[in-house]
Image: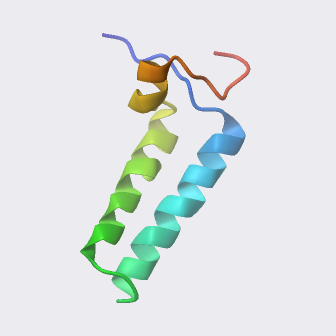
């Protein structure tokens, strides 16, 4: 199964910021272990693919 990109540039930037913020807050002890959920937006940003978007038929990129 080939994963077709469905995450655009602006979306990717927001996902990276959110993911890093959650992980940073976890590492600094400001939030609990649930902050490791920040890995999800990071992985989807770097893969340019979001499974939830695929299920919902959404795309945030112009070229895909």
**Image coordinates for residue 11, horizontal then vertical, percent:** 64, 42
Residue 25 in the figure: left or right of residue 13 = left
Residue drawn at x 44%, y 40% is 44
Q: Residue furthest top?
A: 1
| Viewer-nearest residue: 8 or 56 | 56
**Image coordinates for residue 5, horizontal then vertical, percent:** 53, 22
Decide: is 27 above or below 9. below
| Viewer-nearest residue: 58 or 46 | 58
The scheme the figure's colours follow is rainbow
**Image coordinates for residue 39, horizontal then vertical, percent:** 36, 56
Quadrant occupied by the C terminus = top right
Q: In this figure, what is the number of numbered marks?
A: 0
| Viewer-nearest residue: 17 or 55 | 55
**Image coordinates for residue 14, horizontal then vertical, percent:** 63, 53
Residue drawn at x 65%, y 29% is 60
Residue drawn at x 68%, y 38% is 9
Q: Residue furthest left?
A: 33
Decide: is 5 above or below 18. above
* Image quadrant in which you'd find residue 28: bottom left
Q: Residue furthest front?
A: 56
Q: Residue furthest bottom?
A: 29
Residue 35 in the figure: left or right of residue 47 = left
Residue 10 in the figure: left or right of residue 4 = right
Residue drawn at x 65%, y 33% is 8
């Amino acid at each position: 199964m080939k994963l077709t990109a469905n995450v655009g540039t602006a979306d990717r930037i927001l996902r990276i910021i959110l993911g890093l913020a959650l992980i940073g807050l976890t590492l600094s002890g400001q939030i609990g272990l649930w902050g490791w959920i920040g890995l999800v937006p990071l992985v989807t940003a770097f893969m340019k693919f979001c499974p939830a978007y695929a299920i919902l038929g959404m795309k945030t990129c112009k070229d895909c």
